Image (cartoon, rainbow, N blue to C red):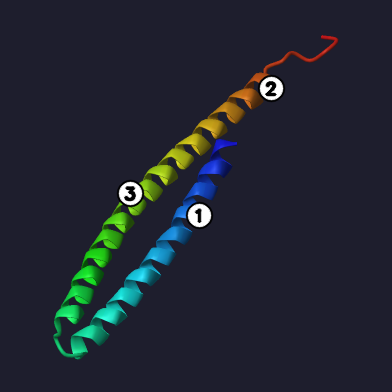
Amino acid sequence: MLIMGNKQKIQSLIDKKIRIMSSISSIETSLQTENAKNRSKRNKTNIDGWVATKKALESKLLGMNATIKALMMVTAEQGDNIKKVLKLKDEQIANIPAMGG
């Protein structure tokens, strides 16, 4: 069913989002450590790389948030459509004349 597939996609994205947030946290810790050290050229290169990686991960998080919201909206809409179809079927069943009538 589409809804179950969407729910699995949403959960998968949330799991990935948690891993990315953990990576960002690790980068922030590394940046704090490197900033406390002296400012050698190698150190500056590390910091620049981590900052760029952090920005890329944060950008990816924004995209994932948008995807999760879109999937949740589609899933809710599908759920509403299924409810409408089920209600319609119930109404059709209720309107079938009794047998032997």
Question: What x and y, as percent, mark residue 28?
Answer: 28, 77
Q: Earlier in the sequence, mark 1 or mark 3?
A: 1
Circle 1/circle 3 CB separation < 8 Å: no
Question: What x and y, as percent, mark residue 64?
Answer: 36, 52
Q: Which residue is mark 1?
A: 11
The part of the image, by quadrant, that contains residue 73 is top left
Numbered mark located on residue 66 in the image? 3
Three-letter amino acid code at the position of disc 2: Ala
Residue at 38% x, 43% y: name it: 70
Three-letter amino acid code at the position of disc 1: Gln
Between marks 3 and 2, how big is the CA–CA gap?
Answer: 42 Å
Q: Quadrant of the C terminus?
A: top right
Label 1, residues with CA under 10 Å away: few <14, some 14-19, many ≥20? few
Q: Earlier in the sequence, mark 3 or mark 2?
A: 3
Q: Between 57 and 71, which is closer to the camera in this rendering? A: 57
Q: Quadrant of the N terminus?
A: top right
Element under disc 2: helix
Q: Is residue 43 left or right of residue 81?
A: left
Numbered mark located on residue 58 in the image? none
Number of numbered discs present? Answer: 3
Q: Which residue is mark 2?
A: 94
Residue at 71% x, 15% y: name it: 96
Q: Between 45 and 75, which is closer to the camera in this rendering? A: 45
Q: For the view shown, which residue lies furthest in the top direction?
A: 101
Question: What x and y, as percent, mark residue 12?
Answer: 50, 54
Q: Between 95 and 72, which is closer to the camera in this rendering? A: 72
Residue at 43% x, 43% y: name it: 71
The correct choice, above or below, for 25 with respect to 57 in the image is below
Between marks 1 and 3, how big is the CA–CA gap?
Answer: 14 Å
Element under disc 1: helix
Instruction: Say which of marks 2 and 1 sits in front.
Output: 1
The part of the image, by quadrant, that contains residue 74 is top left
